[in-house]
């Protein structure tokens, strides 16, 4: 389990599920998890920060999707808020505008409701805020 945690940042839930797949007894699981936490193999705050950086910088996820994924992994809201500070606002907006413009150009559909819906749906799936999406849509449809 040390190697499993050292290879890539893991959260408590992921390690617990891995131990469950090994059919380890509850007492052994608790002992292993305690050892991993005490020796800093599992650190929720470090995991959240790494997760935020990775998902935003490489997959261009928005804050909404990142927050939902971290909540799914039972990360505390304090750790989530700390981790979101890993994304500078200027970088966040730059990545959003780049992704939106690139996506807008790829649609084969003619300008209109169908294209607008595809555009909005794509960015909502990526986890960006509705206000940002509609501001960008208005900017792109004016051209």
Image: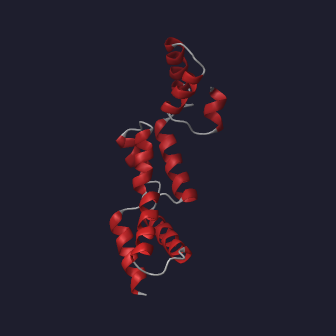
Rendered image quadrant of residue 35: top right
Q: Quadrant of residue 88?
A: bottom left
User: Which quarter of the rendered picture does the N terminus lie within?
Assistant: top right
Residue at point 35%, 74% (across, down): 135
Camera-side residue: 75 or 125?
Answer: 125
Residue under the point 49% across and 47% down:
49
View extreme (left): residue: 131
Whole-percent x, y for residue 28 in the image: 54, 13
Residue at 49% across, 14% down: 26
Task: Return the residue nearer the eye: 128 or 116.
Answer: 116
Compared to residue 121, the image places residue 98 above or below, namely: below
User: Quadrant location of the C terminus?
Assistant: bottom left
Question: Quick one: which residue is furthest to the bottom in this view?
Answer: 143
Residue at 45% x, 38% y is 73
Q: In this view, does 71 lie above or below 134?
A: above
Q: Is residue 113 above or below residue 60?
A: below
Instruction: Return the x and y of residue 123 as percentages of the image width and height.
Output: 44, 64
x, y (%) of residue 87? Answer: 47, 58
Count the marks. 0
Coloured how?
A: secondary structure
Relative to the observer, which residue lies in front, 125 or 31? 125
């Amino acid at each position: 389990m040390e190697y499993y945690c050292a290879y890539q940042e893991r959260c408590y839930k992921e390690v617990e599920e891995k131990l469950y797949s090994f059919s380890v007894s509850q007492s052994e699981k608790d002992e292993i998890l305690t050892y991993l936490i005490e020796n800093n193999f599992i650190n929720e705050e470090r995991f959240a920060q790494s997760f935020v950086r990775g998902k935003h910088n490489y997959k261009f996820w928005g804050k909404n999707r990142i927050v939902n994924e971290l909540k799914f992994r039972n990360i505390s809201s304090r750790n989530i808020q700390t981790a979101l500070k890993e994304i500078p606002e200027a970088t966040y907006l730059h990545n959003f505008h780049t992704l939106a413009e690139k996506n807008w150009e790829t649609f084969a559909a003619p300008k209109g409701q169908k294209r607008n819906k595809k555009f909005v749906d794509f960015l909502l799936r990526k986890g960006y805020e509705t206000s940002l999406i509609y501001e960008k849509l208005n900017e792109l449809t004016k051209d």
